[in-house]
Amino acid sequence: MPPFAIAVGPNLRRSPYFEATVADGVRSFSVYNHMLIPGSFGDPQAEYARLIDGVVMWDVAAQRQVALEGPDAAQLVRLLTPRRLKRLDPGQGRYVPLCDRQGVLINDPVLLPLGETRFWLSIADSDVALWAEAIAQERGLDVRVSEPDVSPLAIQGPKAVEVAAALFGDWVRDLRYFGFREATLDGIPLIVARSGWSKQGGFELYLTDGTRGGDLWRRVKQAGAPHGIIPGAPNDWERIESGLLSYGADARRQERPADPFELGLGALVDLERPDDFIGKQALQARAKAGRTRRRTGWLIDGPAAADPGPHPILRDGAPVGTLWEHCRSPRLGRTIGIGLAAIHALDRGGPFAVSLAGDERAAEPTDLPFL
Ligand code: THG
């Protein structure tokens, strides 16, 4: 534990599930999109184990929605992402990286097309609403940009489908990945989506009335009880094992700029698109020049370090990259991490090391995901 606490002032927003998570014994919070997000309920091993072989519920209200509404909303979506979106079928979500004019990744939201002229971007930790509104205004697009009262609650793990079916009915079993549909639960309005920031399967309930957070939390807890549900939080151990991108950890516009090619999202960039999108020229130039760094997994000798990092990756004592996050993998029984390293060094091969708080440890790059 650090020898200090973070003061919780009015500048830190609270989720509609805040009181319920406090009542259920939340032990730490982080800050994401200017909002408190639970980090742990005090037993990380149990929260991980239940995610892998049972079911967990997470307050992910800090995955805020940026709503784009109006006649030019679809045009704005296509301008914001390098991904080609031929069809925008209502009810089918998509993963849509966003880049700045330099081609640097600035967010990696899930797009939810609610209708022909209405979209949500379910964002990672950066201020997409300001960006989208400025671009819409400067381009003269007829779109209203807002952050509506929408707060996702995730149900993740192999038994999540049983909990969702108990709550909503068997139709949830047929939802496709990133597919979603409106529903109500005891009069609580929400959208049910098959998604979530783990590779263990599950659902996200997008609550659309913030006054009902406690009600929804308790209802999910009750339906999940027969399946052993416990509260938890987006799980770093599992996401590292699964190789999920964490915008903010693996890349961040100011402090750790990286482009989609370097981050392994090149398949989501379409440089052949006839229409314009933000960052197109820069991404074309980067593709032509060829990438010089690559995001990879790392197998590291010894235990995980207390300092989360970042930590330097070395080859023959010289820095060739950065390990952004690492952990002890419970399933592999090894220390693993995710980092960005120079391709020339990766191609030449080892020996590599990671400098973990002054302790040089042998390390080896490996493809993602680990599992
Ligand atoms: N759900 C919702 N909003 C979110 C996240 C989420 N906002 C923040 C953050 N997570 C956005 N980032 C991601 C990153 C990865 C995935 C989803 C959101 C993801 N990736 C899969 C993978 O990499 O294997 C599938 C990607 C694909 O099929 O294209 O699920 O989790 N609401």
Image: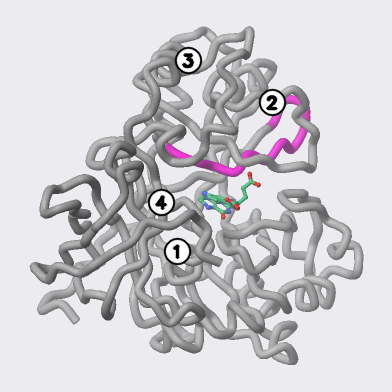
Badge 1: few (under 14), some or many (20 or more) residues near its Cα, within 10 Å? Answer: many
Of residues 49 and 30, which is closer to you in this image?
49
| Disc number lying in front (1 or 2) | 1
- Mark 2 is on which residue type? Leu
Magenta segment: 107-118
Residue wearing tag 1 = 240
Residue wearing tag 2 = 85
Q: CA distance from mark 4 to mark 1?
A: 11 Å
- Please tell me how many numbered marks the rendered image carries: 4
Upstream in sequence: badge 3 or badge 2: 2
Q: CA distance from mark 2 to mark 4?
A: 27 Å
Badge 3: few (under 14), some or many (20 or more) residues near its Cα, within 10 Å? Answer: many
Residue wearing tag 3 = 280
Looking at the image, do the residues carrying marks 3 and 2 touch, with CB atoms under 8 Å apart? Answer: no
Residue wearing tag 4 = 296
Looking at the image, do the residues carrying marks 4 and 3 touch, with CB atoms under 8 Å apart? Answer: no
Residue 86 is a magenta residue: no
Badge 2: few (under 14), some or many (20 or more) residues near its Cα, within 10 Å? Answer: some
Q: CA distance from mark 4 to mark 3?
A: 25 Å
| Disc number lying in front (4 or 3) | 4
Element carrying mark 1? helix
